[in-house]
Amino acid sequence: QVQLVESGGGAVQSGGSLRLSCAASGITFSMYTMGWYRQAPGKQRELVGSITRGGSTDYADSVKGRFTISRDNAKNVVFLQMNSLKPEDTAVYYCTADIVAPFRANHRGQGTQVTVSS
């Protein structure tokens, strides 16, 4: 059974930092591209960023220079370090795992709430 469990969310003031973690089980973690999405109330889900199995990262323009994604393949964990947080970063943050070869699969966690106050 595949599980992606996010942790580290919470409430922080503008300018603060949070580090989200996503622990994966039930998959061969090192084969997957791991991503972070977020969804704010009344808004569409937005891709925050991703990290390939090779360690290449990509970020939404809105978080470039502030957020960093990393992974620990030995511990099956992906991280999202969020610095210089803004109220507009308030959302539920979801971890995803995607693979396209040798088979296709997509998994998503339950999410963790991040609230940034001004």
Image (tube, rainbow, N blue to C red):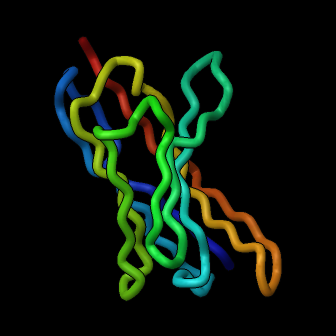
Q: Quadrant of residue 104?
A: bottom right
Q: Quadrant of residue 74?
A: bottom left
Relative to 116, 59 lies left or right: right
Give the residue drawn at x 41%, y 25%: 90
Q: Position of residue 10 (x, y in %)?
A: 30, 37
Q: Position of residue 86 (x, y in %)?
A: 30, 22
Relative to 43, 93 lies left or right: left
For this orientation, the residue located farthest to the right is 103
Quadrant position of the C terminus in the picture: top left
Give the residue drawn at x 60%, y 59%: 96
Q: Position of residue 47 (x, y in %)?
A: 58, 42
> Does residue 88 lie above or below 27 as drawn?
above
Q: Nearer the viewer, residue 104 or 22?
A: 104
Quadrant position of the N terminus in the picture: bottom right
> Does residue 55 lie above or below 11 as drawn?
below
> Does residue 112 lie above or below 58 as drawn?
above
For this orientation, the residue located farthest to the top is 118
Relative to 54, 63 lies left or right: left
Q: Nearer the viewer, residue 40 or 7?
A: 40
Q: Nearer the viewer, residue 79 or 61?
A: 61
Total residue callouts: 0
Give the residue drawn at x 60%, y 75%: 32
Q: Quadrant of residue 9?
A: top left
Q: Position of residue 2 (x, y in %)?
A: 65, 75
Give the residue drawn at x 77%, y 73%: 100
